[in-house]
């Protein structure tokens, strides 16, 4: 039985809800007002009143609403959400409210029955009585609230649109041109080795470069995707990707390549740091001195910086000043490295 404190203050709503909280009265109400084809499906003998705390606060918009639970003849749970309206004028957006109530009821059921993989059926009903006993003239269908009811019905009734990039072939993705670059990158960001796909990656960049996107948007889009792949794509030999991208005319002309050099330099520095820490730990354990850790760390960093500098000098597409800034080595040391590399046989 509903608690007296939970009954609405409006006398019309109060007596109606109190009476329909009696299951025998509710059963008679539904037997008289449910469409015959639904009455033939629902087992009204299983009708039960949901507890007052079934709905969360967001759903308790009207204290007079009542929710019942029953079973269909084939043992499928169904809720009947009864909205009681004693208003002076009908509410145009009532069908939208009923959708919201139905969805909230399904979610509440799912929260309380997590072991059930299926949502229950929810049947919303409105009991309406205005002061002038006029006919209800507002839309009865949710779809009639739209400017194009037929299209709204088609969209809401269609299956979920799913684009599974995992099942698309690279050849198919490449035909998508602008979005093909994004889809290609996403598809291969978790592959075992991106190296074999580096050439195709560069080709798709060329396809995007030849589209009629605005120049600034095109540069930003390609730059962002290239950075994303350089950072996330697993690759056994980064030089494979680096060489392919260096041959890409668009990347070179738009000066995107220096940003890649910065990233590779940072990654090399990180690797050198880890190697330095490992050397330091080993020497520290062997000699029992904290100095071993610091010395090994510094030595590893220095070696790593020098290797990065040599690699960038070999490429020949960065100024000595930029290489010094990237590697954090003195400009004089970069110049000395360049001389030693020139003199080497």
Image (cartoon, rainbow, N blue to C red):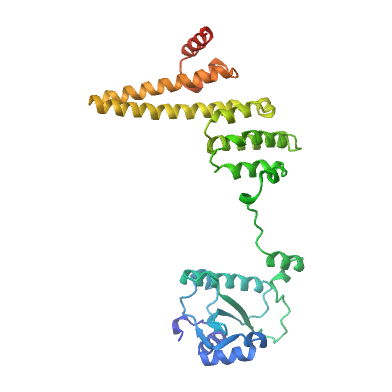
- Image point 71% across, 70% down: which residue? 143
Residue 211 appears in the rendering: yes
Q: Is residue 310 above or below residue 45?
A: above
Left-right relation of 53 to 320: left
- Image point 63% across, 91% down: which residue? 32
Residue 152 in the image: state x and y as whole percent.
Answer: 72, 66
Residue 85 in the image: state x and y as whole percent.
Answer: 61, 81
Q: Is residue 40 above or below residue 296?
A: below
Of the pair 37 and 247, the residue shown nearer to us: 247
Residue 183 in the image: state x and y as whole percent.
Answer: 64, 45
Of the pair 107 and 285, the residue shown nearer to us: 285
Residue 296 in the image: state x and y as whole percent.
Answer: 33, 23
- Image point 49% across, 12% down: which residue? 337
Residue 324 appears in the rendering: no
Res. 81 image quadrant:
bottom right
Of the pair 84 and 215, the residue shown nearer to us: 215
């Amino acid at each position: 039985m509903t608690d007296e404190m939970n009954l609405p203050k409006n006398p019309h709503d109060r007596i109606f809800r109190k009476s329909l909280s009696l299951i025998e009265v509710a059963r008679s109400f539904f037997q008289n007002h449910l469409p015959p084809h639904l009455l033939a499906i629902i087992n009204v003998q299983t009708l039960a009143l949901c507890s007052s705390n079934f709905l969360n606060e967001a759903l308790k918009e009207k204290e007079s609403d009542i929710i019942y639970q029953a079973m269909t003849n084939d043992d499928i749970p169904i809720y009947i959400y009864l909205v009681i309206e004693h208003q002076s004028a009908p509410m145009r957006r009532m069908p939208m409210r009923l959708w919201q109530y139905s969805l909230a009821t399904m979610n509440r059921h799912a929260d309380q029955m997590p072991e059930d993989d299926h949502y229950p059926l929810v049947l919303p009903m409105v009991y309406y009585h205005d002061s002038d006993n006029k006919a209800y003239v507002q839309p009865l269908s949710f779809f009639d609230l739209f400017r194009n009811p037929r299209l709204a019905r088609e969209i809401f009734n269609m299956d979920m649109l799913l684009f599974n990039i995992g099942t698309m072939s690279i050849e198919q993705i490449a035909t998508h041109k602008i979005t093909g670059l994004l889809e290609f990158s996403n598809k291969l960001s978790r592959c075992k080795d991106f190296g074999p796909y580096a050439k195709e990656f560069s080709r798709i960049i060329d396809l995007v470069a030849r589209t009629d996107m605005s120049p600034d948007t095109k540069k930003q889009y390609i730059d962002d995707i290239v950075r994303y792949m350089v950072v996330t794509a697993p690759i056994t030999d980064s030089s494979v990707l680096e060489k392919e991208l260096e041959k890409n005319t668009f990347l070179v002309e738009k000066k995107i390549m220096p940003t890649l050099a910065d990233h590779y330099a940072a990654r090399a520095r990180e690797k050198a740091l880890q190697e330095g820490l490992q050397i330091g730990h080993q020497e520290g354990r062997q000699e029992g001195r904290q100095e071993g850790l610091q010395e090994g760390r510094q030595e590893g960093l220095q070696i790593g910086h020098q290797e990065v500098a040599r690699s960038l000098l070999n490429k020949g597409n960065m100024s000595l000043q930029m290489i010094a800034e990237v590697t954090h080595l003195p400009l004089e040391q970069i110049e000395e490295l360049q001389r030693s590399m020139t003199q080497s046989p």
